[in-house]
Image (cartoon, rainbow, N blue to C red):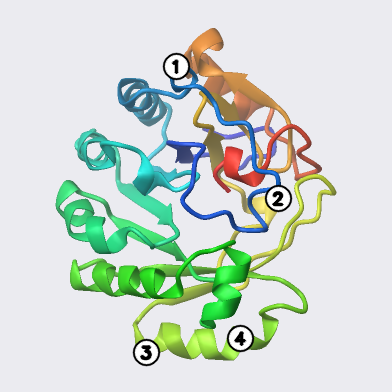
Amino acid sequence: MLDRFKREIYYLRISVIDRCNLRCTYCMPPEGIKLKEHKDILSFEEIEEVVKSAVKLGFYKFRLTGGEPLIRKGIIDLVKRLAKIDGVKTLSMTTNGTLLSQYAEELKKAGLSRLNISLDSLNEKRYSEITRGGNLLDALSGIKAAKDAGFENTKLNVVLVDGFNVDEKGKIKLFADKNKLKVRFIKKMDLKSGDYYGVEGGEGGNCSICNRLRLTADGKIKSCLFSDLEFDIRKEGIENAIVKAIENKPEKGYKSLKREMIQIGG
């Protein structure tokens, strides 16, 4: 479908959980967030119906996000179910990578197309600091596991924070090249102030060609990361919520005051 600005919308990012095993400084506030109750989180059956409805409307590219999607119980089963849906051409996942040693092979067999893995530093101390306690070795092991499982065209997502890790760009680029990974440098964004930027090595942040909607873990379709506008699939109906989100998609981002990044899925 085309939106008001003649952009073709065919990409849906699906947040499957509002929880994470890390607490990255650019994603979660220091005090944390109020977690949704189990009944508020979409079931796998509901997510499957959303994807089927989206395919009917012309969507063919889907990405599972979180929080951290790999901590959602039964995630392999969800991947299997979505990968089998006729019309799903690409089913990928964004993950912090720390659990990939356990799940990479299963994800590949289940039909996952590709991975985006977060890696903001190759320095153990810095990695622990920006993730508030994460272990760099877990992430590196996960990257290796993804490669061993046969995943190709894996992307590294690197959030750049001024005065913290910008000096590592060259080192991370060399690491990516050595491991046949495509690196994307993403300058730290701020939902509340509306600060967002183009992605170095990717197309994100370029509003003129934005092709995506987002589905939050609690069932809201968002037309823009930097907007509070959202439509509830449980109240509006799935197809109606998707159509309304496309019809009301803004020309460019402004601010998002109601949710933190972890509650949207990035």
Which residue is at the far left? 109
Count neighbours of disc 3 (C-alpha within 10 A) and say few if under 14, some if 14 to 19, many if 20 or more.
few
Percent coordinates x, y for residue 112 in the rendering: 26, 51
The disc, 4 or 1, on the residue closer to the chain's N-terminal end is 1
Q: In what element is the residue under mark 2?
A: loop
Percent coordinates x, y for residue 204 in the rendering: 61, 58
The disc, 4 or 3, on the residue closer to the chain's N-terminal end is 4
Task: Kindly report the distance in space between the C-alpha atoms of the residues bearing marks 4 and 3.
Answer: 15 Å
The amino acid type, in three-letter code, at marker 3 is: Lys
Q: In what element is the residue under mark 1?
A: helix
The disc, 2 or 1, on the residue closer to the chain's N-terminal end is 2
Work out whether 122 lies above or below 186: below
Which residue is denoted by mark 1 in the rendering? 39
Image depth: mark 3 or mark 1 in front = 1
The disc, 4 or 2, on the residue closer to the chain's N-terminal end is 2
The amino acid type, in three-letter code, at marker 2 is: Pro
Work out whether 237 lies above or below 19: above
The amino acid type, in three-letter code, at marker 1 is: Lys
Image depth: mark 4 or mark 2 in front = 2
Q: In what element is the residue under mark 4?
A: helix
Q: Which mark is residue 30?
A: 2
Residue 153 can be seen in this image: no
Task: Kindly report the distance in space between the C-alpha atoms of the residues bearing marks 2 and 1.
Answer: 26 Å
Task: Look at 57% across and 34% down and name the residue there.
Answer: 2
Image depth: mark 4 or mark 1 in front = 1
Work out whether 45 lies above or below 120: above
Which residue is denoted by mark 4 in the rendering? 168
Image depth: mark 4 or mark 3 in front = 4
